[in-house]
Image: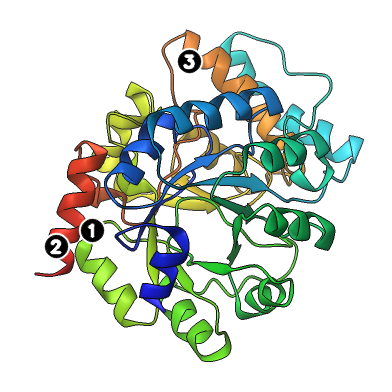
Amino acid sequence: MREKLLEQLGIAHPIVQAPMAGVATPELAAAVTNSGGLGSLGIGASTPAQARAMIEQTQSLTSGPFNVNVFCHQPARRDAALEMGWVQYLAPLFAEAGIEPPDALSEIYTSFVEDDETFQMLLELKPAVVSFHFGIPSPECLSALKGAGVFTMATATSPGEAAKIEAAGIDAIVAQGIEAGGHRGIFNPEVTDEGLSTLALVRLLSRQTTLPIIAAGGIMDGFAMKAALASGAAAVQLGTAFVLCPESAANEAYRAALKSERASETRLTKVLSGRPARGIVNRLISFGEAKGSPPPADYPLAYDVAKRLNGAASKLGSHEFAAQWAGQGAPLARELSAADLVALILEESVS
């Protein structure tokens, strides 16, 4: 299965760099691809014009394949009382940041399931791989991408989601364990989440699917990669491991947090965005999860609040409200170029 997947993707090594919207750059994706892995771009937080520019820049930096990831979340459920309740609860933090709380929230990210402009752009530019997070698009969309020669992947956090991915005709499953940093790809965040670990999920999926499985979550080095491959994965996906690479877009505060003792405490929370996502614990997370706190606004409305708060606070030199996504393996992050990190992971995987 591993050799077949490598051949289908056109890569030499079973290493996928996670898309990490807002952190992955054309330089990072190209460096990983040029090192024999599969580089990735996350465009879920980008406008169609921004996404086009990122893809075209990556195409100018590498002739190899790379992955473009999109968000397939359901549109936000609007509830004015809930939204304003959340905003007013955060009012003391806005006061610290020196600005008034917003009087209305926006859906700052358009779901790919409603974004025909981005869909048409992908059909035009034809990246080698398109992957889906938070769900899967329509059969018509998948058929068109396949007709354009695009290899497709989707995130599953459970055997049930993996079965839906396989039934839809998608080519590969990204098995995301609870250890993973950033947004959990769960299709419906309101249902019970078993919270399966990466290796448990890989083993479960290896018994039910014939599709290649890409293990994601807590994989920071070649030793973890070897364990995942031995458990039935055809490849591994690493995200937090690449954040400290000079090619990533992580700012200095994010890098400093990841290199500090704070990296040992991550939390899966809805506070920052309205959907479960794992990041380094900060004052916003602690405040938002305090006893008696109201539920956050739906995704991505809560993200609108958090970004406004962080934008104001960062101008005052405070980064305590920033989303610094990181997985449970964060303390194992290493500050190396992407090419050197890929080479080291491969060396560790055969030791």
| Label 1 or label 2, whichever comes before in sequence order | 1
Spatial separation of the CA atoms under disc 3 and disc 2: 38 Å
- The quadrant in which the C terminus is found is bottom left
| Label 3 or label 1, whichever comes before in sequence order | 1
Which structural element holds mark 3? helix
Q: Quadrant of residue 9?
A: bottom left
How far across and how far down the image is residue 252, in percent? 32, 22
How far across and how far down the image is residue 80, in percent? 90, 35
Residue pointed to by mark 2: 348
The residue positioned 28% from the left and 36% from the top of the image is 244
**Left or right: where does residue 312 sit relative to residue 103?**
left
Q: Which mark is in front, 3 or 1? A: 1
Spatial separation of the CA atoms under disc 1 and disc 2: 7 Å
Which mark is on residue 221?
Answer: 1
Three-letter code, disc 3: Ser
Q: Mark 3–mark 1 contact, CB under 8 Å? A: no
Residue located farthest toward the left when viewing the structure as drawn: 351
Three-letter code, disc 1: Asp
- The quadrant in which the N terminus is found is bottom left
Q: Which mark is in front, 3 or 2? A: 2
